[in-house]
Image (spheres, rainbow, N blue to C red):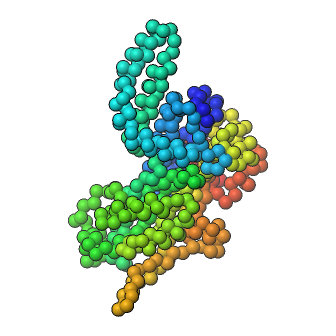
Amino acid sequence: MKPNANPTSPVGRYFASISAALEGLDIFLRDDRSPLYRHGLVAKIVTEYVKRLETSFGCWRHHLDYASTFRISRAESGFPVFQNVLELENDRRTAKARLAEIADPDTLRSEMADFILRHKAFPKDLQRAMAERLYLEAVQDGHVFSPLVLPETVKVSVNPKTKRPFYLTHWGAFDGASNLPMVYSVTVEDSSPDLVKMLVTRDGKLNEKVKIPLPVGGLLNPELAREFDAFVERNSAYSLSPSTIATNMDKDFELLHPKQLRRIVLGPFYSAGITEHNARVNAILENVADPANAWLLTWTIQDIYSKAEKPARKGLWSSQPAREEFHIETDDLDAARMGVSSYEKHALIPHEAYQALYAAGEAETVFAGYKTHIISGGQVISDV
């Protein structure tokens, strides 16, 4: 894609549609009637990552005001290719130093006005410097969707049966092969003796005398936090099934016991005139009058949970730590293929685009197997 400020250009249409889609997803997540809202902290967690995506797209839009190209995965995910994510992360790290080399906004505006008066021409170089400055200012705060958004613990409680503390920890990853943003969360029990002694009372409740300022960056257990960060960096690829990730976590951490792992895969995203991964859908979306309504956003929620825990075995010659038995729903071929206990497929679409699909007789086919949500006038209608 080449930069063009015209909202009817391909790049203008893409940014209008992705902006509308992320805004619509944010509305859906904040709706207390939405399915995700009923999943407790899930909607709140995902909202944080949607905001990171919105910030990233805002930065990329500024970047196009002075950069040459911007690439998206047109035939697969509909999201920007991984190289864009890597460049954004690199620019975030170098933004402060680069900003120090560019004149401040007031100086640039003064120089632009002086250039126009003296040369009777538009100051392209100064405009480029201003655009670069705006981009770097937007990216330097760090709240973008990075290749890996490090874990954060948002809940701590105690399992009264095992008398272990458990954490709800989440992290994000932008997959380099599929070009898909993903949100992970795990509910994990911790049998570390020091943590159990500190956090659990004799009657199996959370010790309220211990003040925990949630959220906490990383895993709550400081002895394992750095190792856990390294683990999610190695084990967050889309090509790994949730059961593989959960099993690897169970094996790599003798004192951590993952009880439920959830992965939310955002995408694919469909945008009229841009994406090419479904010709039938794209042809219908191109007939939608308003580019900001000519899109379709899908996402998948994948869950793997432990159905039982094999207790630790200690013997004279050998020992075996406690191990989880994860449930995979083999009666459902898609669940078995994904390596999950359960899954949900969701689709969010503007009312105008849904009407176009319905009028073409394609709505039932396109949304087969999906929980469909229609956004209209700032409201979301689900279960249509």
Q: Is residue 79 visible?
A: yes
Residue 167, picture quadrant:
bottom left
Residue 128 is situated, as x and y percent measured from the top left of the image, at 48, 25
- Estimate the x, y position of residue 254 in percent, counting from the top left: 38, 75
Of 53 and 288, the residue lying toward us: 53
Image quarter of residue 225:
bottom left
The tally of labels here is: 0
Query: In terms of depth relative to the viewer, which is nearer, 247 or 21?
Result: 247
Left or right? Give the position of 188 relative to 278. left
Q: Residue at x 60, y 32 (%)?
A: 2
Left-right relation of 133 to 338: left
- Is residue 51 visible to the viewer in this orientation of the structure? no
Q: Is residue 105 above or below residue 215?
A: above
Q: Is residue 354 above or below residue 97?
A: below
Q: Quadrant of the N terminus?
A: top right
Q: Residue furthest right?
A: 361
Work out whether 323 lies above or below 131.
Answer: below
Q: Residue at x 77, y 45 (%)?
A: 360
When the figure is inspected, residue 174 is found, relative to residue 283, above or below; the finding is below
The image quadrant of residue 10 is top right
Residue at x-position 53% and y-position 66%: 242
- In the image, is 132 to the left or to the right of 8? left
At a point 71% along the width and 53% down the height, the residue shown is 366
Q: As drawn, which residue projects farthest toward the bottom?
A: 316
Q: Position of residue 358 (x, y in %)?
A: 73, 47
Residue 277, image x, y percentages: 69, 48
